[in-house]
Image (spheres, rainbow, N blue to C red):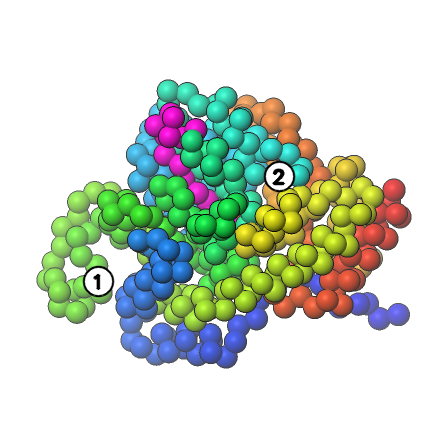
Amino acid sequence: MPEPPLIPLFDIRLSDDEVDAVAEALRSGWLTQGPRTETFEREFAEHLGVRHVVALSSGTAALHLAYLAAGVGSGDEVIVPAITFVATANAARYCGATPVLADVTGPLDPGIDPADVERRVTARTKAVCAVHYAGYPAAMDELSALCGDHGIALIEDAAHAPSASSRDGSRKLGTLGLTGAFSFFSNKVLSCGEGGALATDDDAVAALARSLRSHAMTSGTWDRHRGRSATYDVTGVGFNYRMDEPRAALLSARLPGLEADIEARRRLVGRYREALRGQPGVIVPYRDEEVGVSSCYVMPVLLEEPALRDPLRRLLLEDHRIQTSVLYPAIHEFSAYEAAGLGPLPQSELVARSELTLPLFPGLGEDDQDRVIKAVHEGLSQLG
Ligand SMILES: Cc1ncc(COP(=O)(O)O)c(C=O)c1O
């Protein structure tokens, strides 16, 4: 029998208009940060309902600048969840600070647990970073109150969550804290390959981020090209975290389709939830109301029996040609973090061992999705 086609974890298809927008930028004669970057910043700020968006080279750069803008420096602590991409914690180390890991709530909500955050606050805590895991809102009300009480900055890692909303649906995620950090990495909900952005309502934070993304120069190359400034001063130690024009053009071309993409993801998530929540041995996190405000970045499920997770992943790939992933290994179990002795973090460890991320992208066909659902069902009965 011929092998069935591979179902990828994620796939991206660009429209002709999107490719044309990049080609137009390439032909324009101006490749680095310039007018298209400014246009995208305005469009995304309007989309989010926030005063400022600063486009950057990556989500990691956005987190670094977000922490610096919160005043994080040497000897400070930043509380981040143990279940996140490592950038959330690494960016604190770039500032000379110590990332302190908080546990996540548990298999039904793999987001940061505010009660555990509260326990970990010390006199050195400068910021808390809430990750909107899988595009679902973190417990922002509780975290805002807690950070307000302690005088700590609240940063949002909104890498998974462009256009997702707060639990009550009233505000876009990434606009609730001091800053929101977005990623436009290839597999993200709004993607351009490599890119990121910082969103904020705070004028001074935006000015600092704009300055630091380009070596704290008082004018940029684009300003000088337009004859707006002959020379420049350097007022601090900044970075090269600039976005370039082809990527900005691609983001502007893709932004109008973002809501439709999320709607397609949401419909697929609804089908997964319907099919999998009755499946013995499978835990489907989050509530249906939360799906309604989520960007539905990925489809996480957790296995009641963690020992079955890796054999099931192998079986899905080898017997059914279905790619899956794990979001995420727990940070304190990476070699680069192990020595810091940041554990135990029991709920994070449980999530890290039992989570399985299933294929999800706007163009995933229902037939392929049904193949995934059937394979999970058969795989679990085979292994169980
Ligand atoms: C939760 C989270 N934070 C931060 C990042 C870093 O973003 P980037 O890859 O654009 O640097 C990512 C993306 O991979 C992410 O998933």
Q: What is the total number of numbered labels drawn onto the structure image?
A: 2
The kind of secondary structure element at disc 1 is: helix
In the rendered structure, does residue 159 fall within the stretch colored magenta?
Answer: yes
The answer to which of marks 2 and 1 sits earlier in the sequence is 2
Q: Amino acid at mark 1?
A: Thr
- Ligand 1 under 8 Å from disc 2 Cβ: no
**Dot 2: element:** strand
The residue that appears at 17% across and 52% down in the rendered structure is 218
Q: Residue at x 30, y 53 (%)?
A: 51
- The quarter of the image holding the N terminus is bottom right
Instruction: Please name the residue that numbered disc 2 is placed on.
Output: 109
Q: Residue at left 32%, top 37%?
A: 70
Q: Is residue 48 left or right of residue 298?
A: left
Residue 328 image offset from top left, x and y in percent: 61, 42
Query: Is 167 positioned to the left or the right of 271 in the image?
Result: left
Direction from residue 86 to residue 146 in the image, left or right:
left
The residue to which callout 1 is attached is 221
Neighbor class of circle 1 (other Cα within 10 Å; few <14, some 14-19, many 20+) is some
The residue nearer to you, when weighing 376 against 256, is 256
| Residue type at tag 2 | Asp
Segment tinted magenta in the rendering: 146-160
